[in-house]
Image: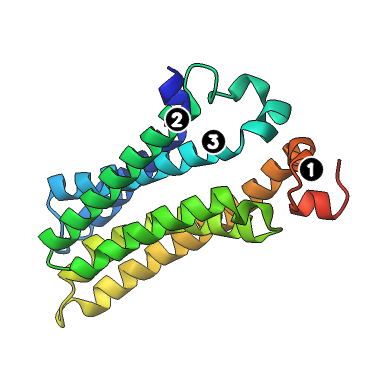
Amino acid sequence: MKFLKLIRYKNLLMLAFMQVLFRYAFLKQQNIPLALADWQYGLLILSTVLLAAAGYVINNIYDVASDTINKPNDVVIGKGISETAAYNIYIALNITGVALGFLLSNIILRPGFASLFILIASLLYFYATTLKQIMILGNFVVALLLSISVLIIGVFDLFPATDAANQAQMAALFSILLDYALFAFMINFVREIIKDIEDVNGDYNQGMNTLPIAIGIS
């Protein structure tokens, strides 16, 4: 249970459900060719979920001090899972997630797409270690990463299956995904600001410069 709490499994389930919904309740109903077989799409979901889980782990590691003030009951590091074990879990999740992304990219003959998974893992790390302390920028990065989890569906499932005959239809569908990604970005950006307001005391004690701290909310 400590491990599930560490990776924030409820958020991961919502992420996986969203990606399943987009493919099987939307794209599969459009009478278009899709690049990924069902098992390959499963790899895409698994890779995304593993990288997100790694992001939660590294965030929990660096948030121990502030979470002890803001949400003491939610602190897992040092209470059942050591910091060393958490780092090992983080590394394992990242390596597996990126490796699956690399495998999937090569399966669909788009090896360059693997860089997207490396970018996601890197942004999650830099968010936890540095960017979250910078006003607005940290909120922007988190919201951007959530929107990427929508766009990655189009990148892997639509783009490789696009040809001259279906280009207009594929572009229209990708545009719809882009709209959903933009909506997800805006909703999550607001959510991150609200979380900063809730966590203002712990963040202030850790010397962070979030928007609520900058404008004097306490």
Q: Is residue 54 visible?
A: yes
Camera-nearest label, 3 or 2: 2
Q: Is residue 169 above or below residue 123?
A: below
Q: Split into 4 quadrants, where in the image is the N terminus?
A: top left
Q: Secondary structure at mark 1?
A: helix
* Figure disc tally: 3
Q: Position of residue 73 (x, y in %)?
A: 63, 19
> Viewed as shown, does residue 89 lie left or right of 44?
right
**Percent position of residue 92, x then y:** 31, 38
Measure how far apart labels 1 and 3 are at the Cα level.
Answer: 18 Å
Give the quarter of the image for residue 173: bottom left
Tell me if 118 is positioned left or right of 55 in this view.
left
Residue 88 is tagged as none
What residue sits 47% from the left and 21% below the top? 81
Residue at x 62%, y 32% (from the top left corner): 64
Q: Amino acid at mark 3?
A: Ile
According to the image, label 3 marks what residue? 61
Instruction: Using the image as rendered, state which of residue 130 and residue 71 is in the foreground.
Output: 130
Q: Which residue is mark 2?
A: 84
Q: Amino acid at mark 2?
A: Thr
In the rendered view, tell whether residue 87 sits above or below residue 115. above
User: In the rendered image, which residue does mark 1 sit on?
Assistant: 204
Query: With respect to residue 173, does 198 lie above or below?
Result: above
> Which marked residue is nearer to the observer: mark 2 or mark 1?
2
User: Which amino acid lies under the numbered mark 1 shown in the image of this protein?
Assistant: Tyr
Looking at the image, do the residues carrying marks 3 and 2 touch, with CB atoms under 8 Å apart?
Answer: no
Question: How much space separates mark 3 and mark 2, taking CA atoms?
Answer: 10 Å
